[in-house]
Image (cartoon, rainbow, N blue to C red):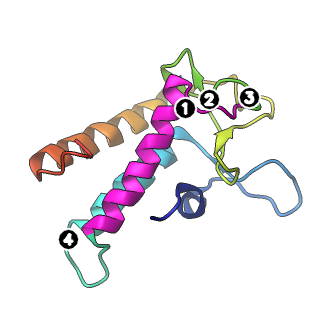
Amino acid sequence: MMTWVSNVNTTYSWWSPSISGGDYANPAEIGLYALAWLAAYDPGRPWSFSWSETEAEVSVILDQRHAWRIGSQAYQPHGPNAYQHSVFYQWYWISWEPPVVGANVGDNHLVPSVDNAWLAAALITIQEYGQAHGHTLLA
């Protein structure tokens, strides 16, 4: 099974070779990245991922997001990974194992409503896709 960290690095919004901390992604990018796996699978083209690859990758992303939301991730060096076990902060350090909310000013204090709305839209779409195509694990 592929690991979320290695693959989500392709979605980072900010990366620096000289500043330590993490490669960043926000909630919208994480949700759209998960949704992109379904978009790449669905056409059934020669370049499309297999269903097992798609389901595995999307499931890992959803499981990580769920662990952040309910607070079950034991390693939370910069505080809770979600605001009041509900919505997500502005930036996550996705190159850490496991990924965590960032420690820089604003990373774990700002709650972006638009990014959380994009994440919610992606999650609803993934759920509906799973229900419509009999993929109960995603639904």
Q: Nearer the viewer, mark 1 or mark 3?
A: 1
CA separation in Å, label 4 and label 1: 31 Å
* Label 1 CA crowd tier, 10 Å (few <14, some 14–19, many 20+): many
Give the residue at mark 3. Answer: 106
Magenta stretch bounds: 51-76
Q: Nearer the viewer, mark 3 or mark 2?
A: 2
Give the residue at mark 1. Answer: 68
Which image quarter: residue 42? bottom left
Residue 24 is labelled as none
Residue 130: percent from the left, percent from the top? 19, 47
Question: Cβ–Cβ below 8 Å for labels 2 and 1?
Answer: yes
- Secondary structure under tag 2 reads loop
- Name the main secondary structure of what is drawn in magenta: helix
The residue at the point 73 percent across, 57 percent down is 15
Q: Nearer the viewer, mark 2 or mark 4?
A: 2
Give the residue at mark 4. Answer: 43
